[in-house]
């Protein structure tokens, strides 16, 4: 790291980055040096490298405000939004490594193919109001839904989940992002579908062993495990293994029905 003064009198610092470059056939870390200024984030440094040294460097970004979810990468081995990760929060005396999300197939450089997530999303029936829904919702329910709906679909929780990343069980587990979507629907007081069985079967919630890695990387601070996955697991266990709770659940949920293929509709992304 070397320093010099910028035109504004601030301290410019030269930082070393190791950026993964390659495609599905091969690739590796490539060294770069870039002059940085106070306040810059990793995305700024990567875009400066793209501008000045590597115009064909592939990187996905959009809002630069931590809201579109598209700039997720592994910065020093940790899934992070590049636009939210300040350079001065990373050790100054070591190179910064920037790699694509490891759980998904790489397309080129820092860009991965996350389309599997959109296919999973299509398997979840959107909000389907109860036929007799009274359109009143308590503040507590609203607050709970608001937390889940903060998701920006960065898929970093999917990236870090060992069920997907290490064990590759993409056909058996929907992953934490979709547990959150299912929780927002299952806990919606006006939703008319009973999703508990599909959460246990097709969505594979039993494969989650509550390591909480997903919660740790969520840039929106959603309590994925404590507020989403654990309550869903409890509902499933009550249904399947507790005869008293099963009867109580039936009483509370008698105006909910099982989802059918027709419930998926033409655009199941709308929830
Ligand atoms: S808590 Fe569950 S969903 Fe989250 S990372 Fe761990 S296994 Fe995956
Ligand atoms: S739950 Fe959090 S980490 Fe997962 S996709 Fe949504 S915003 Fe990203
Ligand atoms: S560019 Fe939109 S979240 Fe980073």
Image (cartoon, grey):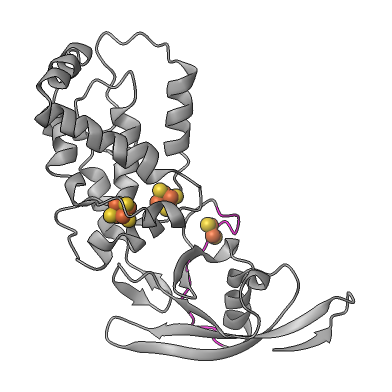
Is residue 40 placed above or below 195 in the rendered structure? below
The percent position of residue 267, horizontal first and vertical second, equals 28, 38
**Residue name at image x 40 percent, y 73 percent:** 100
User: Quick one: 210 or 164, which is closer to the camera?
Assistant: 210
The percent position of residue 6, horizontal first and vertical second, equals 84, 80
User: Quick one: 91 or 3, which is closer to the camera?
Assistant: 91
The verdict on residue 64 being magenta is yes
State the quadrant of the N terminus. bottom right
Is residue 32 placed above or below 72 in the rendered structure? below
**Residue name at image x 43 percent, y 83 percent:** 20
Is residue 204 placed above or below 155 in the rendered structure? above
The percent position of residue 177, horizontal first and vertical second, equals 34, 48
User: Quick one: 60 or 204, which is closer to the camera?
Assistant: 204
Q: Main secondary structure of the magenta part?
A: loop
State the quadrant of the C terminus. top left
**Segment tinted magenta in the rendering:** 54-66
Residue 167 shows in the view: yes
User: Quick one: 63 or 159, which is closer to the camera?
Assistant: 159
**Residue name at image x 38 percent, y 37 percent:** 227
Query: Is 64 on the left or on the right of 170, as rendered?
Result: right
The verdict on residue 42 being magenta is no
Q: How many marks on residues?
A: 0
Residue 127 found in image quarter: top left
The percent position of residue 230, horizontal first and vertical second, equals 30, 39
Residue 65 found in image quarter: bottom right
Residue 72 shows in the view: no
**Residue name at image x 22 percent, y 30 percent:** 235
Residue 245 found in image quarter: top left
């Amino acid at each position: 790291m070397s320093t010099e003064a910028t035109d504004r009198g601030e301290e410019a610092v030269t930082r070393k980055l190791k950026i993964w470059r390659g495609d599905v056939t091969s690739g590796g870390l490539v060294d770069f040096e870039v002059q940085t200024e106070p306040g810059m984030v990793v995305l700024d440094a990567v875009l400066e490298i793209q501008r000045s040294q590597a115009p064909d460097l592939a990187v996905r970004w959009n809002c630069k405000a931590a809201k579109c979810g598209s700039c997720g990468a592994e910065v020093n081995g940790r899934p992070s939004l590049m636009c939210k990760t300040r350079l001065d929060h990373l050790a100054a005396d070591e190179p910064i490594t920037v790699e694509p999300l490891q759980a998904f197939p790489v397309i080129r450089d820092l860009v991965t193919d996350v389309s599997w997530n959109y296919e999973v999303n299509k398997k979840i029936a959107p909000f389907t109001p109860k036929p007799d829904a009274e359109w009143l919702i308590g503040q507590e329910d609203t607050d709970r839904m608001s937390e889940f709906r903060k998701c920006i679909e960065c898929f970093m929780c999917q990236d870090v989940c060992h069920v997907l990343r290490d064990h590759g069980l993409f056909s058996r587990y929907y992953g934490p992002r979709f547990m959150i979507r299912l929780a927002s629907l299952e806990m919606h007081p006006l939703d008319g579908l009973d999703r508990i069985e599909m959460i246990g079967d097709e969505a594979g919630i039993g494969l989650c062993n509550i390591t909480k890695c997903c919660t740790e990387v969520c840039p929106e601070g959603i309590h994925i495990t404590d507020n989403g996955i654990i309550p869903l697991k409890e509902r499933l266990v009550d249904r399947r293994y507790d005869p008293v709770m099963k009867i109580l659940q039936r009483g509370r949920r008698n105006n909910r029905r099982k989802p059918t293929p027709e419930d998926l509709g033409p655009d199941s992304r709308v929830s």
